[in-house]
Image (cartoon, grey):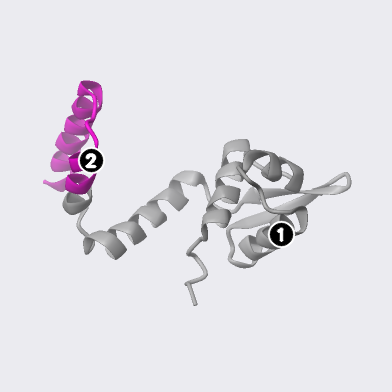
């Protein structure tokens, strides 16, 4: 059984929709997901995401509006840590090497990365 904080593909799609909108109803989530499941299935997934602690909801009129419980940046950091641990033995270097072997960053991206690395070096001293 997967850990409560691990998300299925559909759960990730739902979270992406809700993060992109800042909050979303079942109808809005269905609009955002390619080949969306049925309305009852989306409602069930939203309930699961609430139980896992990823979402809260408020009632607005006749519908619930679901909102993430954590800022996207915080959720992203947590997800990245899990990916690094699961696929790269916790090594950021291995993850970057893998990414760069399949992708060619622009000169601007490389410049920004270089500045971030320099900044991280200064913090580490």
At mark 1, the secondary structure is helix
Disc 1 target residue = 41
Q: Mark 2 and mark 1 in contact (Cβ < 8 Å)?
A: no
- The image quarter in which residue 102 lies: top left
Tally of marks:
2
Asked if 19 appears above or below 94 in the picture, the reply is above
Disc 2 target residue = 102
**The magenta stretch spans which residues?**
96-125
Left or right: where 45 falls relative to 16: right
- The residue sitting at 76% across, 43% down in the picture is 27
Q: Is residue 105 magenta?
A: yes
Crowding near pointer 1: few (<14 within 10 Å), some, many (20+)? few
The residue furthest front is 35
Q: Position of residue 33 (x, y in %)?
A: 62, 43
Q: Position of residue 64 (x, y in %)?
A: 78, 50
Left or right: where 76 falls relative to 12: left
Crowding near pointer 2: few (<14 within 10 Å), some, many (20+)? few
Chief secondary structure of the magenta span? helix
The residue furthest left is 125
Q: What label does residue 27 carry, if any?
A: none
Asked if 12 appears above or below 114 in the picture, the reply is below
- The residue sitting at 17% across, 38% down in the picture is 117
Q: Position of residue 96 (x, y in %)?
A: 21, 45
- The residue sitting at 20% across, 57% down in the picture is 91
């Amino acid at each position: 059984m997967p850990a409560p904080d691990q998300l299925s593909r559909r759960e990730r799609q739902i979270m992406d929709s809700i993060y992109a909108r800042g909050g979303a109803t079942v109808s809005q989530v269905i609009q955002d997901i390619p080949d969306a499941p049925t309305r009852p299935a989306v409602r069930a997934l939203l309930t699961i995401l609430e139980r896992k602690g990823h979402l809260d909801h408020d009632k607005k009129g006749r519908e619930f509006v679901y909102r993430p419980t954590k800022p996207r940046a915080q959720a992203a950091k947590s997800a990245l840590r899990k990916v690094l641990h699961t696929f790269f033995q916790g090594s950021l270097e291995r993850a970057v090497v893998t990414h760069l072997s399949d992708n060619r960053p622009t000169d601007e991206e490389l410049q920004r990365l270089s500045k971030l690395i320099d900044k991280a070096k200064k913090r580490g001293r």
